[in-house]
Image (cartoon, helix red, strand yellow):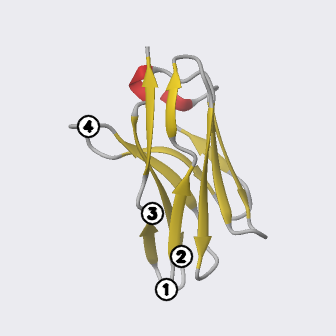
């Protein structure tokens, strides 16, 4: 059974850092991503990493967030620095497989940044 379990969220002050982790199990994954959803807003992409390690970070996270993965441990990470109140959201781990073509979501972890 495929599972994605996020951890590492919490309460932090503006300018602080958090490291999110996503423990994946059940199979190996191709692209993996972090999304976030703030109250009253749509879920949005934060960063993507391919199995080979190629990364893409969206504009609001560039220079502050770093996505990485450990394929041997089936883990995904998001290092978040210089956090801002507008980064407050539930952060979700997302993973895709090509064969068969499917995607999976974790349950999310809350990140709250206070001013």
Earlier along the polypeptide chain: callout 1 or callout 4? 4
Earlier along the polypeptide chain: callout 4 or callout 2? 4
Q: Position of residue 25 (x, y in %)?
A: 60, 76
* Residue 113, picture quadrant: top left
* Contact flag, marks 3 and 2 (Cβ < 8 Å): no
- Report the side of 95 relative to 44 (left or right): right
Q: Position of residue 7 (x, y in %)?
A: 55, 53
**Residue at the extreme front:** 11
Residue under numbered circle 1: 100
* Contact flag, marks 3 and 1 (Cβ < 8 Å): no
Disc nearest the viewer among 4 and 2: 4
**Disc 3 versus disc 4: distance between alpha carbons?**
18 Å
Residue in the image at 49% along x and 85% along y: 100
Residue under numbered circle 2: 97
Disc nearest the viewer among 1 and 4: 4
- Mark 2 Cα within 10 Å, few/some/many (few <14, many 20+)? some
**Disc 3 versus disc 1: distance between alpha carbons?**
19 Å
- Report the side of 46 relative to 67 (left or right): left
Quarter in which the C terminus is drawn: top left
Q: Position of residue 61 (x, y in %)?
A: 54, 31
**Disc 3 versus disc 2: distance between alpha carbons?**
15 Å
**Residue at the extreme top:** 115
Residue in the image at 60% along x and 69% along y: 24
Residue under numbered circle 3: 106
* Residue 112, picture quadrant: top left
Residue under numbered circle 4: 39
* Contact flag, marks 1 and 2 (Cβ < 8 Å): yes
**Disc 4 versus disc 2: distance between alpha carbons?**
29 Å
Looking at the image, residue 6 lies above or below residue 43: below
Res. 79 visible in picture:
yes
Q: Nearer the viewer, residue 1 or 33?
A: 1
């Amino acid at each position: 059974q495929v599972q994605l379990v996020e951890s590492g969220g919490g309460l932090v002050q503006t300018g602080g850092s958090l490291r999110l982790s996503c423990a994946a199990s059940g199979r190996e994954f191709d692209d993996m991503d972090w999304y976030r959803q703030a109250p009253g807003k749509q879920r949005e992409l934060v960063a993507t990493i391919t199995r080979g390690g190629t990364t893409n970070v969206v504009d609001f996270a560039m220079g502050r967030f770093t996505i990485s993965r450990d394929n041997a441990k089936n883990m995904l990470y998001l290092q978040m620095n210089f956090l801002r109140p507008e980064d407050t959201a539930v952060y979700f781990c997302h993973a895709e497989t090509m064969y068969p073509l499917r995607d999976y979501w974790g349950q999310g972890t809350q990140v709250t940044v206070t001013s």
